[in-house]
Image: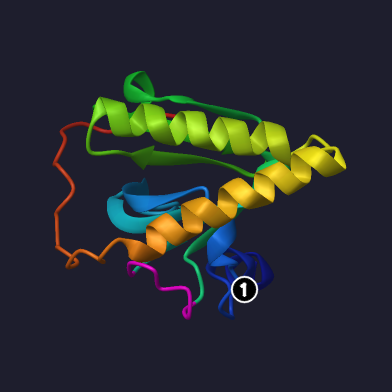
Amino acid sequence: MSAYLTQLRGNAPVDIDVSSIRKEGWVFKESAVLRQFRRRWMVLTPDKLYSFKKERGYDTPPTEEVDLKLCGTVKSADDLTNRQYTFTVQVPDRNFFLMASSDAERNEWVAAIGRATTESRRVRSYSEEVEYQEQQAILAAARAAQPSPEEEEIAAPKRGGSRFV
């Protein structure tokens, strides 16, 4: 059991290549045990989806690390959670429930995770890889040029009732 918890929590910071980040931003993630939504900084790379307590907190261990090669489904989950703008990332051991701040943001996350899941299973040709690396370098330069907004403490919206899975 403790090995499983260590794997979930992570015991060391992960080495994230900032130029390989596909998408990042604040999302609410449902906790595994208490089923409470907590604000997390989500980072999508070509192979993994990470969550952190702090914005761009790559020097701390992630609170979650999802291997996209194991990802089965990414889809809207409003009907499962009784909350707006939620989506689920399903892996063999767990269903992760995440909540965006708008329908458009949820659709962006679902599409980005879906693309990364598909691409993590596909082998690219050399020319595709070169083109992809060039695009990622442009995106990384654009991200680096953006100022980091102040971290705001936002509480997850309250909901009534309980969810049965």
Magenta stretch: dominant secondary structure: loop
**Residue 73 lies in quadrant:** top right
The answer to whether residue 151 is visible is yes
Q: Is residue 79 left or right of residue 165?
A: left
In the rendered image, residue 149, in percent from the top left (x then y), is placed at 20, 63
Segment colored magenta: 54-60
Q: Quadrant of the N terminus?
A: bottom right
Q: Which residue is at 31% across, 34% downward?
A: 105
Query: Left or right of 48: which side holds 44?
Result: left
Q: Secondary structure at mark 1?
A: loop
Q: Please name whichever residue, 78 or 40, is drawn nearer the observer in this view of the structure.
A: 40
- Nearest the viewer among 9 and 116 is 116
Quadrant position of the C terminus in the picture: top left
The residue under label 1 is 15
> Can residue 163 be spotted in the picture?
no
- Quick one: 134 or 63, which is closer to the camera? 134
What is the number of callouts on the image? 1
Amino acid at dot 1:
Asp
